[in-house]
Image: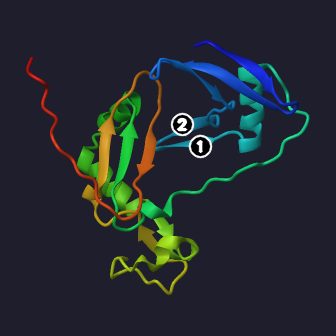
Amino acid sequence: MRHRAVPRRRSNRLLRQYRESLDSDLWELPAGTLAGREEPGRVVPTETPAACAARELREETGYDAARWDKVAELADNAGSVIRGDVLVVFGPEHAHTIAAGGFSKRDVQRFLFEHARNKVGILKLRAMYKAGNWPDWVDRDDDEALCPIVGAPEDIHIVVTGGPGKHSAFIPTFGTSKSVTRRIEPSRR
């Protein structure tokens, strides 16, 4: 992987980095993943987000920052809550670990449906609260009640893709729409 740090204005560093999938160079902020240790069924962070940012800046640019300012904070997408679909993308190594543990795709869907929940009190702060499509059994008056991220386990679509490394992703949909899947036939030339 080729990359170099280029000062853009006095206080910022961007990387010009080649991305194989696009066959092009992109300007990017230094970024990375929190260091962590693996425990059964999860990874536990072993550094703070601030420590991760400092480490990544140093690793990717060779620079240390004299000052840090938070410019953004991200939260999960409440648009995927309740009736939409979500996509869970497992890298091959994560998929192998799950399969070696004896879990099927349906087992993973059920587990995520039962455990991936948002508190009603948090959801009330977001636009989707008034959508009116909550499960009947969720007590909307109890801020501590837990609401599933989808309507049913089969609304969690699971795919395996990628190369070496333990890389997986959660991809929420936009709003409460359902995905449409259709078979793509190879062209016959």
Task: Name the quarter where the C terminus is drawn.
Answer: top left
Query: Which amino acid, mark 1?
Result: Val
The Cα–Cα distance between marks 2 and 1, rounded to whole angstroms, is 6 Å
In the displayed structure, does residue 61 sit left or right of residue 136? Answer: right
Look at the numbered disc 1 and give the secondary structure of its residue: strand
Q: Is residue 102 left or right of residue 140?
A: left
Quadrant hosting residue 2 = top right
Locate residue 166 relative to residue 152 in the image: left or right.
right
Judging depth in this view, the residue of 128 and 51 nearest the camera is 128
Q: Amino acid at mark 2?
A: Glu
For the residue pair 14 and 145, the one nearer the viewer reads as 14
Tell me the quarter of the image containing the N terminus: top right
Query: What is the quadrant of residue 37 in the picture?
Result: top right
Q: Residue at x 35, y 55 (%)?
A: 111
In the image, residue 7 sits, relative to residue 94, either above or below, namely above
Using a 10 Å C-alpha cutoff, classify the residue at mark 1 as few (fewer than 14 neighbours), some (14 to 19) or many (20 or more). Answer: few
| Residue under the point 23% across and 51% down | 180
Q: Are marks 2 and 1 in contact (CB under 8 Å)?
A: yes
As drawn, the label of residue 38 is 2
Residue visible at 43% across and 84% down in the picture: 139
* Residue 105 image offset from top left, x and y in percent: 26, 45
Residue 179 picture location, percent across and down? 28, 53
Which residue is at the far right?
Answer: 66
User: Where 138 sits versus 35, above or below?
Assistant: below
Mark nearer the N terminus (2 vs 1): 2
- At a point 37% along the width and 33% down the height, the residue shown is 97
**Helix or strand or loop: what does disc 2 sit on?**
strand
* Residue 48 visible in the picture: no
Q: Residue furthest bottom?
A: 141
Badge 2: residue crowd in 10 Å (few <14, some 14–19, many ≥20): few
Numbered label attached to residue 44 = 1
